[in-house]
Amino acid sequence: MEIQWLGTAGFRIATSTASFLIDPYLSRNPGADPRQELRPADLAPASHIFVSHGHFDHLLDVPAVARQTGAEVWCSPTAARTLEDMGLAPGQIRTVEHNGAEADFSGIRAQAFYSRHIRFDFRLMAATLARVGRRLPDIIPLFANFPCGQVLSWQFELEGRRIRFFGSAGASDKELEGIGKGEVDILMLPLQGHSKICAKGARHVRFLEPGMVIPHHQDDFYPPVSQTVDISDFVHRVQQDCPGTQIREMALNEIIQL
């Protein structure tokens, strides 16, 4: 099995029989760090695209990637409407209508679970507005045209492993308790969206105690809206509280084999 980080919350996961994508977002902008050289055609072949929510940094490139790969797109009703407004054929979209919806393909089981977006705190919003400044009128459409909708966390069972992907780190205690401690082999966890995101991310790890955690979304994907997140505090907290959990920090487009 291969896992490739595409930047932001994007991943490609491939086995000997299938390849699928999660939140593939490549566009970024000229100031992004690091730069992304991949284009939608580079992600082929892919049979499925799984979307966590409708914000632009998760959904913007999905229509182009879907057209290039022919992949089915699984997403919330809100994200589905946005994709249709962007011109993606309805026949390529599979709407998640209920908690626990499943997709089975090529020996892989994918399951969607209702989750929550992290709440942007005042400190983060104030710092972001200060960076954006006079560019605010240009930035507003990125949020107005890409409503969040129902947030989905995705669970994948493949090759004897269970992978849990979060596109935003807003899961409640009840949600995390429902997953179960030690039931996740690989946790893909976003570290963006709050001034105390490292503590909030470490909370997810304490609840789940996965075998491995792959942090993502910590990159400066669309400045000045975004910024690079120093995740050293997250690493320290996980090492201290969950010494049995391996932390795997990935470079942009890096591929790891398991």
Image (cartoon, rainbow, N blue to C red):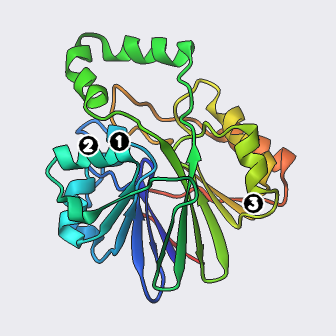
* Label of residue 78 in the image: 1
Are dots 2 and 1 in contact, CB under 8 Å?
Answer: yes
Sooner in the amino-acid sequence: mark 2 or mark 3: 2
Judged from this view, the residue extending furthest toward the bottom is 16
State whether residue 69 is above or below residue 126: below
Q: Please tell me which residue lies in front, 92 or 14.
A: 92
Q: Residue 39: in sight, yes or no?
A: no
* Label of residue 82 in the image: 2
Judged from this view, the residue extending furthest toward the front is 97
Indicate the secondary structure of the residue bearing disc 1: helix
Are dots 1 and 3 in contact, CB under 8 Å?
Answer: no
Left/right placement of residue 86 relative to residue 238 reads left
Q: Please tell me which residue lies in front, 194 or 85.
A: 85
Left/right placement of residue 154 relative to residue 240 reads left
Disc 1 residue type (three-letter): Thr
Q: Distance between the residues labelled 1 and 3?
A: 31 Å
Are dots 2 and 3 in contact, CB under 8 Å?
Answer: no
User: Disc 2 or disc 3, which is closer to the eye?
Assistant: 2
Residue 183: x and y in percent read 77, 64
> Which residue: 53% across, 41% down?
168
State whether residue 13 is above or below residue 248: below
> Which residue: 52% across, 85% down?
107
Residue at the spot of label 3: 210
Disc 2 residue type (three-letter): Thr
